Image (spheres, helix red, strand yellow):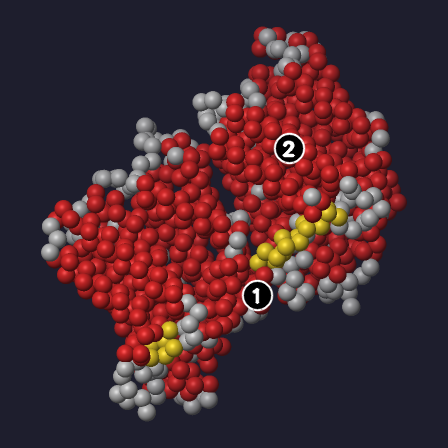
Amino acid sequence: MNTATFSLATLAPAIPEIVLLALACTLLLVDLFLAERDRHVTYWLGIVALLGVAVLAALTIGRPTAVTFQGMFVSDMMSQVLKVALLASVAITLLYSREYLEARGLLAGEFVSLSLFASLGMLVMVSANHFLTLYLGLELLALSLYALVALQRDSVVSTEAAMKYFVLGALASGMLLYGLSMLYGATGSLELNRVALALSHSQANPTLAAFGLVFVVAGLAFKLGAVPFHMWVPDVYQGAYTPATLLIGAAPKIAAFAFVMRLLAHGLGGLAADWSVMLAILAAASLAVGNLLAIAQTNLKRMLAYSTISHMGFLLLGILSGSDNGYSSAMFYVITYALMTLASFGMILLLSRAGFEAENLEDFRGLNKRSKWFAFVMLVVMFSLAGIPPAVGFLAKLAVLQAALEAGWTWLVVFAVLMSVIGAFYYLRVVKLMYMDEPVGGEPPVAGRADMRVVLSANALAVLLLGIVPAPLMDLCARAITASL
Amino acid sequence: MTGMTISLAIWVPIAFGVAVLAVGNDRNPALGRWTALAGSILGFLACVPLWTGFDLKSAGMQFEEMAPWIARFNVNYHLGVDGISMPLILLNSFMTILVVVAHWEVITEKVSQYLAAFLVMSGLINGTFAALDAILFYVFFEAMLIPMFLIIGVWGGPNRVYAAVKFFLYTLLGSLLMLAAFIYLYWQTNGSFEILDYHKVPLGITAQVLVFLAMFMSFAVKVPMWPVHTWLPDAHVEAPTGGSVILAAITLKIGGYGFLRFNMPIAPDASHALSGFMIALSLVAVVYIGLVALAQSDMKKLIAYSSISHMGFVTLGFFLFNGDGVLGGLIQMVSHGFISAAMFLCVGVLYDRMHSRQISDYGGVANTMPVFAAFFVLFAMANSGLPATSGFIGEFMVVMGAIKVNFWYAFLAGTTLVFGAAYTLWMVKRVLYGEVANEHVAALKDVGRRELVFLVLLAVCVLALGVYPKPLADVMNPTIQQLLAHIAESKLQ
């Protein structure tokens, strides 16, 4: 009976999205009228827009769950918290990227507005309550990112990376869409609540639903970069220019987590027995491949790409537990992971100069001689990624491991633990290079703008402090999950 | 203030470590050095109330502190000491002072980072000994790896990077398995990470054996027990003197401490079932590693192997399950802390002058460094277990404990008195006595005032503990008796 009952009040839950859309469009127009030398205005407007919407989203945290647009869109606590996290992470990405982009003449309006549209896509994904909105958000994000990677037109590697990203991403979208259509056939609905209902009352054709699930999980695994659907990750991470890599590597992981939660935990919760086994296999393969192949890398961005794959394995470990405990652990994991990714790529951006990419492991050689503080920043991040206390990476891993153990995945937990030892090796190598080797011939001291240095330092300190005082964020994640599912 | 005593012992050194980094300046390291010295002394003073205020009649935890840390997983900032952990905390804080004193003219590069690493590590080690919450313990236990990794890797010898990475990965593998055991116990106790709750939780024999082995992997690497000892000679040889001192005197003890705090009380039936295995490994360490030590040509390596052999005594004593054995093992831990530190510092004194650790480069040092030679001989005697030195007490008690269980255990353990004397004294003979070997030795200067400070301090400790160990035994005994009573009860249902 909800036909044509449109009023302004029904828009209220979607205010952050609406405002961001309006600002992104305005930005496009403003950029049109700016002279080439005033490009930084667009850039700062973009950051202000992101932070403003983040504040707007933060103000909604704690509001009761609201569904709108005929059940297509939901604003619940999980989406509210994740929105703040991902908007902040895009804003920080922009902040870190400025010098790099300026030096390469990429700081054009396109970069900023595409980032804003990507953020909008992520917001929609996070709040989607319907197969169509999920897909809409996903595609808005993906298309913006393809374009972003391709932005560096004169670079062959970047273009190749964009091409790969686009072809494989389109394939994944196709699979996902195909799976969703099967699920529609099986359950007769596109709305997640009704799908869940149909599955729980066993009104769905189980064979068809299971088939659909396989395609959906494959599509999700593509987007997350889980093995065996990970082939694009190393190439794109390495090939794209670093700010684009960071844009792909941090915030979209948060959105992808929400995507998996909406689709699997909420919509297809009735098939948990099926998908948890699939996720377990994906997780085990990701942990093995990610950690083992990272050892062989000499390019830091590529190494971090493999490290991402292994971290997605850990994330899946939390999700496949299928309990509130597991979901909130995974949520904590993904937020802290985004924080660590920001800091690690932030370091690469900091060390890069005009005409010089600090993306090889060798470029970190003897960093301690060049800047004690930023060597320490990188040390904290590396140990956090390796899961060594007191940095937050340890607690994040602990949380997902205990959730998986609770759910009875003992072999997977032991496997994950063994793989982290292997993983520790390549993070240690970075620390070794920074502290135990001499810098290669007359390296200059670390430069970088003051704003970036401050934010990067704060970022690393947050990684450390969240490990010492994790309770507020953990509780927030736990509350968000209980209030949302 | 008593409510904060342990916290102070942990956080004072760490705070000073951060302060040293902040004031540190590589061109003018004096300020950093004095700050570090002040920090280490204050850190030690912060521990003194633990000794003076210790209740000798109580076997339980004292100076307990408790605050929620991560409420969602029921993880608490829970600290406390008993007769086992308190002496080790004191030992650690004491050693930190020596390390700071010992570095003075030796380390000239990145001084503030070096000192900060030691101070931070000192606090973390105190935390490891005092933690009563498994996750808190794990955090301290693992965080300790970071400064140690840097100490070995940055200030070590030529092959330092290999040694540092080996040390790190060996320890990490062990401790992650222990973490898995903690999480398992968390679910067995219905959501508690309290170590003392783990002591009480009933477990089937299979579970006990698995938990025992997981923790064994962690602590055996630390001790280190044969055959997972291979990281130690590498790490010791490459570490700077201070690193070797802390490694040998303190971090090895964490392994022994772990067996007493975790393995034995949490899995008593498995401990009994596997005691033959543990004793066998310990005896292999005592006898075989003793022989290996005999064959070394590098002084530091020799002392490293001697450490493994002596730590074999410790684990042997623990798994005899009688009062003599456990007390002997514990006293051996403290005594070995002093003696190994002294031996490494002595080698450090020689190394600073000659830049060689090879025994063959020395000879007749006693002629040019008589004062040093006197101390070196004293510590060597202690290392070989001469009565009236601290080395004798622990070894003798362990042998006493062993003879009650099985004559052959005692016999094999007793061989160390021969091997230990052989390798230590043979080294002393080749280094100190005989003709002056070359012009480098002839040019040696005897120990300075700074070096005298730590040599005298250690000599006093070694002799005092050797002549009158009663105060230490009084502190340890109630806790040991309670522990033995606890282990004697089966946890099977």
In the image, residue B242 above or below residue A272: above
Picture quarter containing residue A436?
A: top left
Residue at 33% in and 52% down: A92
Task: Identify residue for label 1.
Answer: A405
Q: Nearer the viewer, mark 1 or mark 2?
A: 2
Residue placed furthest toward the bottom: A1
Which amino acid, by three-letter code, is at mark 2? Answer: Leu
Label annotation for residue B7: none
Residue A36: % across, % down: 12, 49
Q: Chain of mark 2?
A: B
Residue B1 appears in the rendering: yes
Residue at 26% in and 87% down: A4
Residue A16: % across, % down: 31, 67
Residue B400: % across, % down: 86, 39
Disc 1: CA contacts within 10 A as few (<14), some (14-19) or many (>=20): many
Residue A128: % across, % down: 34, 74
Answer whether labels 1 and 2 touch (C-beta < 8 Å). no
Count of all numbered marks drawn on residues in the image: 2
Asked if both marks, 1 and 2, belong to the same chain, the answer given is no
Which amino acid, by three-letter code, is at mark 1? Answer: Leu
Disc 1/disc 2 C-alpha distance (Å): 43 Å
- Name the element at disc 1: helix
Residue B216 appears in the rendering: no
Q: Chain of mark 1?
A: A
From the viewer's side, name the closer residue of B20 and B285. B20
- Name the element at disc 2: helix
Picture quarter containing residue A363?
A: top left
Task: Identify residue for label 2.
Answer: B42
Q: Quadrant of the C terminus of chain B?
A: bottom right
